[in-house]
Amino acid sequence: MKYKYNIGCSLDNLLGARDFIRQSLKKHVASEVTLNEIVLAIDEMCSNLMIHSHHCDPDHLLELTIKAEPKGNIVFEIMDDVTVFDINAFQEPTLDNLITVKRKGGLGIRLVKSIMDSIEYLNRNGKNVCRLTKRVD
Amino acid sequence: MVHIKRLQEDGADVLAIVGEIDASSSIDLDLAIAKSLSEGYTKILVDCSSLEYISSAGLGVFMSYIEEFREKNFRMVIFGMKEKVANTFNILGLDELLTIVPTKTEAKKKLSEV
């Protein structure tokens, strides 16, 4: 099964994107906790891209596709046409550092890396694709 | 969308979060805590029984107050989280840094501990 949703790069659109993911995956993910983790990881990726790559311009689009594979993998692709921000290369700050300097960034990337089984970046037809895979038992 | 209700019980300010906190709505949580502090409350209870979702932006708000609360000996206790929401805190180990208990009764007890 494949599901597709276009998201304008306004943070106000995150709620709609989360509802789309929940609706798309409710037949594929039995555990409410796991489903929430997945929704969280994609929400974090989208909000990161909206803020850091698209400066919250609602006219810019993120194309989200979700593919539920029969063998239990769920593959997410977020496609856009700006510079890739590779979270694999990002060294997230320690929790202690986040507290002492009162930074509010870096937690999202830590969450995505903890939740997803793989995070890859590729280029397709001149567009940047971030592919995230989650194994669901 | 999030709605934060406030009421006062036994000298503590109770913030009841209803809905979802994300990068768009985390400012509402930040403002609610800041307002509570500006009104002189030193004990804050955060009721999460109607919180359906929290992202890193919301977690970051709680974390940003840890140091200030420690320095001023203020107390903040979070209670009533659903399993899926508690799991988000646990993934990052924030359950070790914040005071989180299951019920309001336990939260009030925590507030009264010296």
Image (spheres, coloured by chain):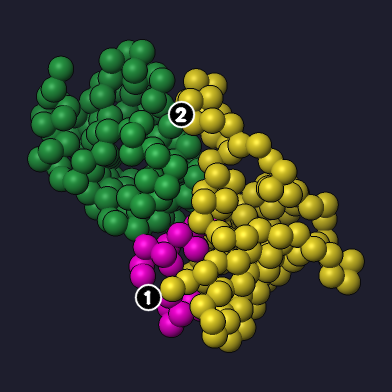
Chain colours: A yellow, B green
> Comparing marks 2 and 1, which lies closer to the viewer?
1
Q: Secondary structure at mark 2?
A: helix
Specify the subunit that label 1 lies on.
Answer: A
**Residue pictured at 46% horizontal, 28% vertical:** B64
Rendering coords of residue A98 (x, y %): 52, 28
Callout 1, which amino acid?
Ala
The answer to whether residue A39 is magenta is: yes
Left or right of residue A79: residue B49: left
Q: Is residue A61 above or below residue A24?
A: above
**Residue pictured at 51% horizontal, 78% vertical:** A72
Q: What residue sits right under mark 1 in the picture? A: A30
Q: Quadrant of residue B1?
A: bottom left
Q: What residue sits right under mark 2 in the picture? A: B64
Q: Secondary structure at mark 1?
A: loop
Callout 2, which amino acid?
Ser
Rendering coords of residue B50 (x, y %): 28, 55
**Residue pictured at 37% horizontal, 75% vertical:** A30
Left or right of residue B82: residue B60: right
Q: Residues within 10 Å of mark 2 (few under 14, many from 20)?
A: some
Rendering coords of residue A66 (x, y %): 61, 75
Q: Quadrant of the C terminus of chain A?
A: bottom left
Q: Residues within 10 Å of mark 1 (few under 14, many from 20)?
A: few
Stretch of the chain drawn in magenta:
A22-41
